Image (spheres, helix red, strand yellow):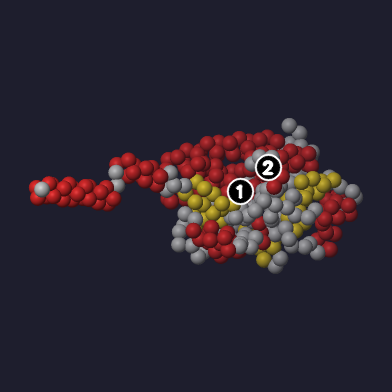
């Protein structure tokens, strides 16, 4: 009987010891699932608005989860972030902003981040002497670099570089994705070069000064009704000067935007002798309708090309 009790005690001890080891030491299968789960964790990116979010999505693909901070249908210049959006910026692995005060609320929050932030205007191959426009009593660098398909390729490359620093294990994938997308942007550039090579007119009259980089790239000129910000109201003298200019230059079309009231542009068109109006998208954001229809940066830029060709009397 004593021997039986002794044997039973030893057996219980062995079982308990085994259970303790099982609890404290993960099995190979469990460890494998944990490693696999970690390897599948997506890089989180807070992008200020549509063209930046689009570049991140194209370069990052399924490796990245991107949050576009500017909701559909919202004009991004004066965006104010709610608490949840601010936390998204602060917690993201990477933040991407245009910089230069284009979206002050976003840039102020991004400045408080512990992690990296890609400031596009600082990163691009442009300098203080490039494309400046009058904004009130000051001269400012035009931030609308994404409307130049060639400069936008540089944006894509900078996004790929920033993602590679955050996630070096997938650097080659980001580089490959950037190359694929840039090939499509190079084709878009060729479409613009060909499509705008022979035009009867060269002057674009736009809702605001958003198309300076595009017009510079393709040998056109721009006159914005408003300045860099579409919310700035033109004074009566500005409208009078534009009326004289469009008559002198034989302008036939005044361009409006989806995210800005067309009232002033229509007034100018009427005062200048009943000119036509057409939509030209500065791609600062998409409407809910455009998103539902599957609009992309390239498709919207192609629509812009057609609108410009028609307004300027361009021939193939």
15 to the left or right of 205 = left
- What quarter of the picture does the C terminus occupy? top right
Query: Residue 213 at x, y = what percent?
Result: 65, 49
Give the crowd class for mark 1: few <14, some 14-19, many >=20 residues within 10 Å.
Answer: many
Query: Residue 77 at x, y = what percent?
Result: 66, 59
Relative to 185, say whether 6 is above or below: below
Q: Which residue is mark 1?
A: 51
Q: Residue furthest right?
A: 273
Query: Residue 197 at x, y = what percent?
Result: 70, 37
Q: Which residue is mark 2?
A: 292
Q: Residue furthest front?
A: 1
Front tag of 1 and 2? 2
Q: Residue furthest bottom?
A: 137
Residue situated in front as seen by the camera: 250 or 29: 29
Residue drawn 37% across and 42% down?
Answer: 33
Q: Report the Cα–Cα distance between label 1 and label 2.
A: 17 Å
Earlier sequence position, callout 1 versus callout 2 = 1
The secondary element bearing badge 2 is classed as helix
The answer to whether one can see residue 101 in this image is no
Query: Residue 223 at x, y = what percent?
Result: 75, 53
275 to the left or right of 259 = right
Relative to 127, say whether 60 is above or below: above
The answer to whether one can see residue 255 in this image is yes
Q: Residue furthest top?
A: 316
């Amino acid at each position: 009987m004593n021997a039986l009790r002794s044997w039973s005690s030893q057996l219980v001890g062995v079982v308990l010891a085994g259970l303790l080891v099982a609890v404290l030491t993960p099995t190979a299968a469990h460890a494998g699932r944990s490693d696999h789960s970690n390897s599948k964790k997506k890089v989180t990116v807070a992008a200020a608005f549509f063209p930046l979010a689009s570049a991140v999505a194209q370069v990052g693909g399924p490796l990245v989860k991107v949050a576009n901070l500017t909701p559909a249908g919202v004009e991004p210049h004066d965006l104010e972030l709610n608490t949840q959006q601010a936390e998204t910026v602060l917690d993201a692995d990477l933040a991407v902003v245009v910089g230069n005060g284009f979206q002050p609320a976003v840039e102020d929050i991004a400045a408080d981040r512990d992690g990296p932030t890609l400031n596009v205007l600082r990163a691009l191959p442009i300098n203080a002497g490039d494309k400046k426009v009058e904004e009130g009593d000051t001269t400012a660098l035009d931030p609308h670099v994404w409307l130049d398909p060639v400069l936008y390729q540089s944006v894509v490359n900078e996004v790929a570089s920033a993602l590679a620093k955050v996630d070096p294990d997938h650097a080659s994938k980001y580089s490959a994705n950037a190359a694929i997308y840039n090939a499509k942007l190079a084709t878009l550039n060729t479409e613009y070069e060909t499509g705008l090579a022979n035009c009867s007119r060269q002057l674009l009259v736009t809702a605001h000064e958003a198309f300076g980089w595009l017009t510079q790239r393709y040998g056109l000129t721009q006159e914005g009704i408003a300045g860099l910000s579409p919310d700035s109201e033109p004074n009566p003298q500005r409208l009078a000067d534009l009326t004289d200019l469009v008559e002198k230059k034989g302008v036939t079309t005044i361009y409006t935007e989806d995210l800005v009231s067309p009232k002033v542009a229509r007034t100018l068109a009427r005062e200048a002798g009943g000119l036509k109006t057409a939509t030209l998208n500065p791609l600062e954001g998409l409407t809910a309708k455009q998103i539902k229809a599957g609009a992309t940066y390239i498709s919207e830029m192609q629509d812009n090309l057609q609108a410009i060709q028609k307004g300027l009397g361009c021939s193939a």
